Image: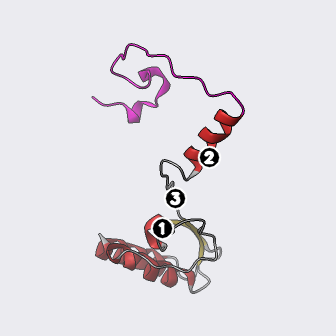
Amino acid sequence: MGRVDRQSMLALKQASRHRKQPLKIIYTGGIWLFPATAGDSLLTEKTQFAPLPAFRFMTETIRTLSHGTDLNLTVIHPALACGQTTGPIAEMTAALKEAGRLKPARRRKPNGRLLKSTTLPRFMLLP
């Protein structure tokens, strides 16, 4: 995965040379590029990368894409890290309990589908 990602991003950077306007690129990193946290420590935009070994190539690619003026780079790090007592889901649950707004879910008979097919774009439907 790393080799293909790196080669494709280098080719994109090469192809964007000498443009009148910088090429807009969105590159996705992820939670796996940051160090593990414990207790009350939080990750911020200023936290230094400490990637898992399998994803180390991504930090090098981000650094490479960041240099130069031919690209307008945006890096997004999607993440949702949760535990039973920590993270956004636990915090929302606690807030609802505290406000007295959390009610037990009613048991419904499952129909085998989470969404009606009419709510999904055609390209997302399984044959």
Q: Residue at 51%, 22% (x, y): give it.
A: 105
Disc 2: which residue: 91
Disc 1: which residue: 29
Quick one: which residue is furthest to the top in this view? 109
Residue range highlighted in magenta: 99-127
Say which amino acid is labelled 3: Pro
In space, the residues marked 2 and 3 are separated at their CA atoms by 19 Å
Say which amino acid is labelled 2: Glu
Does the magenta portion include 96? no
Image x and y of residue 12, in percent: 45, 74
Q: Nearer the viewer, mark 1 or mark 2?
A: 2
Looking at the rendered image, the quarter that the N terminus falls into is bottom left
Image x and y of residue 23, in percent: 58, 71
Disc 3: which residue: 78
Q: Is residue 21 above or below residue 83?
A: below
Q: Nearer the viewer, residue 57 or 101?
A: 101
Say which amino acid is labelled 1: Gly
